[in-house]
């Protein structure tokens, strides 16, 4: 699993603690990363309707209150292109009874785990994260 989810939480928490627009460079400095990565994630967060930015105005700001941004919903946005929380290896030996059926078996289990992750994360919001800072 990559760090995009945690970095997205960092971005939303940082913006949630300030009422002024923040530049990608300012956010990148907080993350100790580069502004290009921040802009990429912010573009994704804008598509999810969590952020806004305006042409001619420097910076990003939240579009909704921090207590309405559920972590499970954010997780689903960030990992929308992933099949599951973990990859299933795809080059099993189909001549083996385990190799032939492992992908199907894991897919069923991983689907349940994925939903459990989302459900548990949805019990937390960005405001909950901010309150623990």
Image (cartoon, helix red, strand yellow):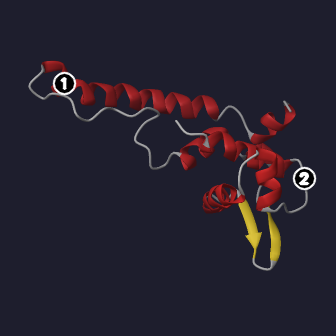
For residue 55, side relative to residue 87 (left or right)? right
Image quadrant where residue 88 sits: top left
Coordinates of residue 78 in the picture (x, y in percent): 56, 48
Coordinates of residue 39 in the picture (x, y in percent): 67, 61
Q: Residues within 10 Å of mark 2 (few under 14, many from 20)?
A: few
Position of 62 relative to 67 (above/below): below
Q: In the drawing, what numbered circle is on residue 34?
A: none
Secondary structure category for the residue under label 2: loop
Q: Is residue 86 visible?
A: yes
The residue under label 2 is 18
If you read the primary sequence from the N terminus, does the residue marked by circle 1 or circle 2 appear first?
2
Taking the spot 86% from the left edge, 33% from the top edge, the residue there is 133
Question: Which label lies toward us, 1 or 2?
Answer: 1
Coordinates of residue 5 in the picture (x, y in percent): 62, 42
Q: Residues within 10 Å of mark 1 (few under 14, many from 20)?
A: some
Taking the spot 33% from the left edge, 31% from the top edge, the residue there is 107
Q: In the drawing, what numbered circle is on residue 99?
A: 1
């Amino acid at each position: 699993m990559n760090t995009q989810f945690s970095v997205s939480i960092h971005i939303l928490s940082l913006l949630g603690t300030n009422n002024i627009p923040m530049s990608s460079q300012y956010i990148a400095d907080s993350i100790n990363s580069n502004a290009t990565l921040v802009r990429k994630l912010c573009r994704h967060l804008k598509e999810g309707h969590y952020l806004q930015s305006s042409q001619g105005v420097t910076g990003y700001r939240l579009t909704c209150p921090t207590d309405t941004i559920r972590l499970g919903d954010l997780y689903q946005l960030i990992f929308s292109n992933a099949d599951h929380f973990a990859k299933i290896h795809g080059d099993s030996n189909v001549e083996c009874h385990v190799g032939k059926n492992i992908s199907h078996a894991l897919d069923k289990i991983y689907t349940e785990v994925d939903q459990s992750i989302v459900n548990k994360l949805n019990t937390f919001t960005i405001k909950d994260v901010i309150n623990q800072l």
